[in-house]
Image: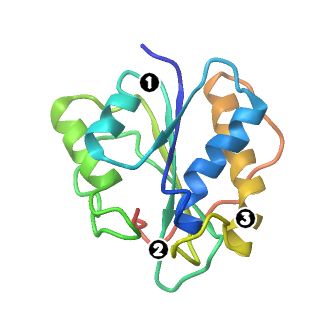
Amino acid sequence: MTAPVVIGIGNEYRRDDGIGPALVAALAEHQPAGVRLILSDGEPARLIEDWDGAPIAVIVDAVLCEPSAPGEIHRTELPQPAVGVHSRPAGSHSLGIPDALRLAEVLDRLPDRLIVYAVEAADVAFGTDLSAPVAAALPRLLDAVLDELAAARGGHRSGSAGTTSCGPSPTV
């Protein structure tokens, strides 16, 4: 069994699509003990390699929802196999988390627990700065992920992100 893993998916040169890398950078400043921090482009085979054997994998990515609420944080936990997970592509990824989940299930390479934090994007055009609403969500997202990691170790941190759900299955 490997260590817990946090995977930040996205492209830091596509504004809000860089929320995953921004979260990994923020976590690196906190240096959570025994946690692997990984930057990813969301390619399914690499995601499977990154989370294989992990007791908990936390994935952070940008998401597009209708209606849109930029900066809104959505949390989805998939403790069970991902059969029927919605797979409409969004953002700049042609394949993504739902494809990786289905493939990992078939290969029996899902982590013990998988938590996806998706942050609604306002702007995925070229640029390196997060939009104001997504940048404002980063501290809440950081607290939520640190809480997940603490809970996985049997501890608890104070403060929560106040996450919501983007319909029955967000487009990630």
Q: Amino acid at mark 3?
A: Ala
Taking depth in this image into account, of 10 and 105 the one nearest to the observer is 10
Label drawn at residue 135 = 3
Question: Mark 2 or 3, which is nearer the eye?
Answer: 3
**Does 35 sit left or right of 54 as displayed?**
right
Q: CA distance from mark 2 to mark 3?
A: 16 Å
Q: Position of residue 55 (x, y in %)?
A: 47, 24
Residue at left offset 49%, top offset 30% = 56
Q: Mark 3 or mark 2, which is nearer the start of the sequence?
A: 2
77 versus 172 height, above or below: above
Question: Mark 3 or 1, which is nearer the eye?
Answer: 3
Outermost residue, bottom side? 67
Label 2 Cα neighbours within 10 Å, binned few <14 / some 14-19 / many ≥20: many
Looking at the figure, which quarter contains the N terminus?
Answer: top left
Q: Amino acid at mark 1?
A: Ala
Question: Which residue is the site of mark 1?
Answer: 54
- Determine if residue 69 is in view: yes
Q: Position of residue 83 (x, y in %)?
A: 22, 50
Q: Position of residue 167 (x, y in %)?
A: 45, 73
Residue at left offset 60%, top offset 24% = 35
Question: Which residue is the site of mark 2?
Answer: 64
49 versus 92 height, above or below: above
Residue at left offset 62%, top offset 18% = 34
Label 3 Cα neighbours within 10 Å, binned few <14 / some 14-19 / many ≥20: some
Q: Position of residue 170 (x, y in %)?
A: 43, 66
